[in-house]
Image: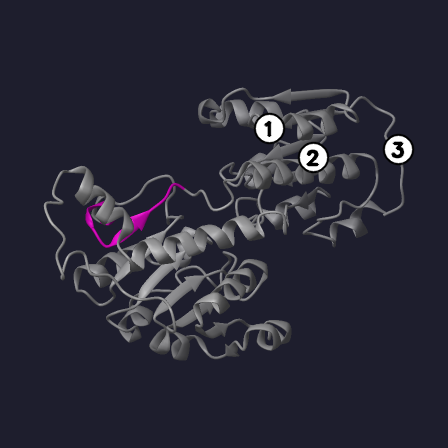
Amino acid sequence: MPSARRHHSTSVFVTTPIPEEALNTLKSSCDDVVVWPDHSKLSRKEFLSNIESSDGLLCLLTDRVDGEAIRRMKRMKVIANCAVGFDNIDLRAATRRGIMVTNTPGVLTEATADLTWALILSTARRIPEADRFLRADNYKEWGLMLLLGQPVYGKTLGLVGAGRVGTAVAHRAKGFAMRILYYDPLRNEKLETETGAQRVDLMTLLKEADIISIHVPLDKTTRHLIGAKEFAVMKPTAILVNTARGPIVDEKALIKALKGKRIAGAGLDVYEHEPKVPRELKSFQNVVLLPHIGSATLESRTRMAVLAAQNLVAALDGRTPPNLVNPEVLQKLR
């Protein structure tokens, strides 16, 4: 898209406090930057009111930018999502209105891969359960059969999705001498060459993997990708880990599989109806639950916010943002 500097005063709405570096990026190029001081207290009414006359929106994956919201946007040029996924945004509606949508890929890859491995090891070796056991003063003496977990070294890792994060998780698995299987619509030859990973169909992966880790985006094809039929073919010793999006897993089917000891455990950072977590999931000792902290390092979150701000500024300056997810919108803007 050719550069065309704006001539009117620009207003940007940011739905949550962001790191100073990202805020300075916005303030250096935008005339009016409104930052909501407490995201948890941003009501739907206040959200809709603030976006009506804004030229740019910097939002989180928890902000619902649906058709109703987009219809309220009178001047909006760009929606900069501070996340890799953008399933919270009605992409078609935004494109129809000529609104650019951007995301923040790449900058959270390593942090999310680290967190995935934290969940793998915590679930397999029952670390949170052991911690609770000790803190409750139940540790009286060492025992041969005390809190027996599962080994990870030399086991089979099944990656559902072999994009950036899935690939990073696979590289870490090499240190555990793991056999790596992956399911993805697209072949990842580089992953195969560097890690020895083997591409298989989903059912083969589910049948053979000791640890199943989810790394696909959420869309119509992946919603409830893992349900009752999929749990039925897993090993009873299998562990399911999800650091992608909650609705990829049918939570009711997961709870049923755990109740019936169909699988050995689960490590979850995301949930089907966030921030709600079913009470039954909380009751399982063999399930590790985290509050969506996959990218939660100071470095990663700062880089995410800065990249979102850079995307937004580029769009308002008449340039093509580096992480535009609806490039077809450029045809409408020419």
| Residue 289 magenta | yes
**Which one is in front in this view, the residue at disc 3 or the one at disc 1?**
1
Q: In this view, does 268 lie to the left or right of 84?
A: left
| Secondary element at tag 2 | helix
Q: Quadrant of residue 189?
A: bottom right
Amino acid tagged 2: Ala
**On screen, residue 284 above or below 49:** below
Amino acid tagged 1: Ile
Magenta span: 281-291
Of residues 288 and 143, which is closer to you in this image? 143
Give residue 184's position: percent from left, percent from top. Answer: 53, 71
Q: Distance between the residues labelled 2 and 1?
A: 10 Å
Query: Label 1, on which residue?
Result: 18
Q: Earlier in the sequence, mark 3 or mark 1?
A: 3
Amino acid tagged 3: Arg
Q: Is residue 158 left or right of residue 97?
A: left
Circles 3 and 1, Cβ within 8 Å, touching? The answer is no
**Which one is in front in this view, the residue at disc 3 or the one at disc 2?**
2
Give residue 230's position: percent from left, percent from top. Answer: 33, 70
| Residue depicted at 71% across the width and 49% down the height | 324
Q: Quadrant of residue 82?
A: top right
| Secondary element at tag 1 | loop
**On screen, residue 8 above or below 105:** above
- Disc sitting over residue 5 in the figure: 3
Circle 1 Cα neighbour tier, 10 Å, few/some/many (<14 / 14–19 / ≥20):
many
Any part of residue 81 in sight: no
| Residue 106 magenta | no
**On screen, residue 117 above or below 301:** below
- Disc sitting over residue 134 in the figure: none
Query: Label 2, on which residue?
Result: 309
